[in-house]
Image (spheres, helix red, strand yellow):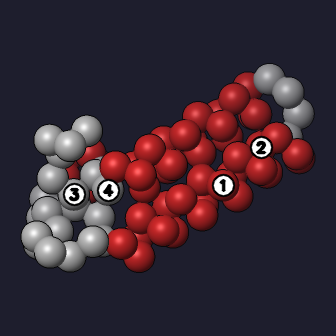
Amino acid sequence: MFFLQRNLPAWERALRLGGALLLACAGLLWLPAGWPMALALAGAAGLGLTGIAGFCPACALVGRKPVAKGKP
């Protein structure tokens, strides 16, 4: 994933990771097993991966520019 140019600032990456953690916990603790839990965990995985990589394909699709070099 090192070839991807980051288009998410550090504060948004942190929010995505926190949201992924909350969504995964909510999915595991409060949702019934089956499709609702699977959808919540898939959403949490997507948020977590974009937060870790610092790249959001949907943001790139709408024209969000890469984060400048030297900034996290």
For the residues marked 4 and 3, what is the alpha-carbon distance in whole angstroms? Answer: 5 Å
Residue of label 1: 21
Would you say residue 62 is visible in this rendering? no
Q: From this view, report whether residue 66 is shown above or below residue 42.
A: below
Position of the C terminus, as image quadrant, is bottom left
Position of the N terminus, as image quadrant, is top left
Q: Nearer the viewer, mark 2 or mark 3?
A: 3
Give whichever of discs 4 and 3 has the lower sequence position. 3
Residue of label 4: 54
Q: Which structural element holds mark 2?
A: helix
Give whichever of discs 4 and 2 has the lower sequence position. 2
Give whichever of discs 2 and 3 has the lower sequence position. 3
Q: Residue furthest top?
A: 34
Task: Say few, some or many: other residues with alpha carbon within 10 Å of mark 3 (under 14 / 14 to 19 / 20 or more).
Answer: many
Would you say residue 7 is visible in this rendering? yes
Do the numbered discs 4 and 2 sit on residues whose CB atoms are within 8 Å? no
Do the numbered discs 4 and 3 sit on residues whose CB atoms are within 8 Å? yes
Q: From this view, report whether residue 36 is shown above or below residue 11.
A: above
Task: Say few, some or many: other residues with alpha carbon within 10 Å of mark 4 (under 14 / 14 to 19 / 20 or more).
Answer: many
Q: Residue at x 51, y 69 (%)?
A: 15
Residue of label 3: 6
For the residues marked 2 and 3, what is the alpha-carbon distance in whole angstroms? Answer: 28 Å
The disc label shown at residue 27, or none: 2
Do the numbered discs 3 and 1 sit on residues whose CB atoms are within 8 Å? no
Coordinates of residue 12 in the picture (x, y in percent): 41, 70
Q: Nearer the viewer, mark 4 or mark 2?
A: 4
